[in-house]
Image (spheres, rainbow, N blue to C red):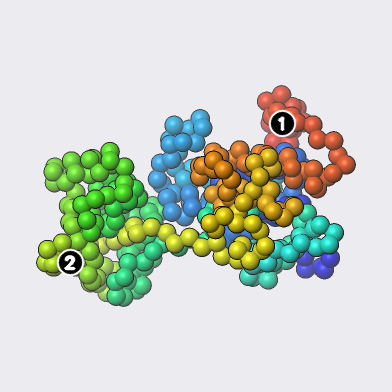
Amino acid sequence: MTKSEILTDIVIIGAGPVGLFAVFELGLLDLKCHLIDILDRPGGQCAELYPEKPIYDIPAFPVISGQELTDNLMKQIEPFKPEFHFNQMVEVVEKLPDGQFIVKTNEGKVFRSKVVVIAAGGGSFQPKRPPVENIEQYEGKSVQYAVRRIEDYRNQDVMIVGGGDSALDWALNLHSIAKSLTLVHRRDVFRASPASVKEMFNLVDEGKINFILGQIASLEGENGQLSAVNIKTKNSEMKKITTSRLLPFFGLTMKLGPVADWGLELNDNLIVVDTEKFETSIKGIFAIGDINYYPGKLKLILSGFHEAALMAQAAKKIINPDERLIFQYTTSSTKLQKKLGVK
């Protein structure tokens, strides 16, 4: 081992909700984790794409935002002192003859571990950009691909483009605080839930949302600040709409990235795992969350939590093969409660 290598029990690739909960399950078993993520903060897509959007299917939370879920998970894993490495992409995962792994990032960091856990969601993701000239000069200021702070849209002339759940959800959530809200979609058929579509059209009838059938033709503004968006309607007419905030929801481009070159068995760009340990085709490498595939897989956060728990049990056996593993409950084990700082 070289002096520059970071030695740890587990390297977790991805710091979204499933990767964070994996820290908890592994920490209960006295395993040390380092997490690497391409984003600049924990939370994955929850924190990056919909930090303030309500999530309704987390057990025991009738409703919780993506950021609240992330904050709660970070608090839950505090006792285990995980170490984070943000703004970095893992480029190389190499298995050594002794069974350990060398993990290298694009920033030159090198890790040595006995287990690697891939919890990278769907891989690296980026929003699809509308084919509009000069849109780049407005991005990050008046053109955003995700709502990170609802207050940024208060008293603004907001335009949302798209026909999926994200477009409809944010139209319904933002119209009450925006100065004006215009929804633009190229056709009158939507991919969003029928209930959301019905509610949106009710608000259109009430004059609270302006709906236009058409596509973005061009943008107007200066110094990164939009003043208007020109829409080519279904009838080929041009409409100029006063706009200070533009939210295009054209979906995400998902890329598996370097993971595709690590020699793992794949199924349609997802990593094949077993359902006992969620181990990949390479012993010692596990995949949990949206990035894995097995028959009956559901892409739900709660499914990833379950996968993390079973993965941790198997990882412990790899790292400490001679240690007898006794399953314990946090509700009754004083040993586990002491680790959590509650006893």
State the SS at label 2. Answer: strand
In the image, 59: left or right of 139? right
Front residue of 249 and 274: 274
Residue at the extreme top of the image, as rendered: 332
Q: Residues within 10 Å of mark 2 (few under 14, many from 20)?
A: some
Marks 2/1 in contact by CB < 8 Å: the verdict is no
**Horizontal and vertical percent for residue 57?**
46, 36
Question: Which label number is shown at residue 293?
Answer: none
Q: CA distance from mark 2 to mark 1?
A: 62 Å
The residue indicated by pointer 2 is: 232
On screen, residue 146 versus residue 10, left or right, reads left
The x, y position of residue 37, in whole percent, is 59, 59
- Across and down, in percent, residue 259 comes to 61, 62
Q: Amino acid at mark 1?
A: Gln
Image quarter hosting the N terminus: bottom right
Circle 1 sits in a helix, a strand or a loop, which is it? helix
Residue that appears at 48% across and 49% down = 46
The correct choice, above or below, for 284 with respect to 338 in the image is below
Looking at the rendered image, the quarter that the C terminus falls into is top right
> In the rendered image, which residue does mark 1 sit on?
337
Question: Residue at (16%, 63%) from the top-left corner?
Answer: 233
Whole-percent x and y of residue 153? 30, 54
Left or right: 228 in relation to 27? left
**Is 176 above or below relative to 328?**
below
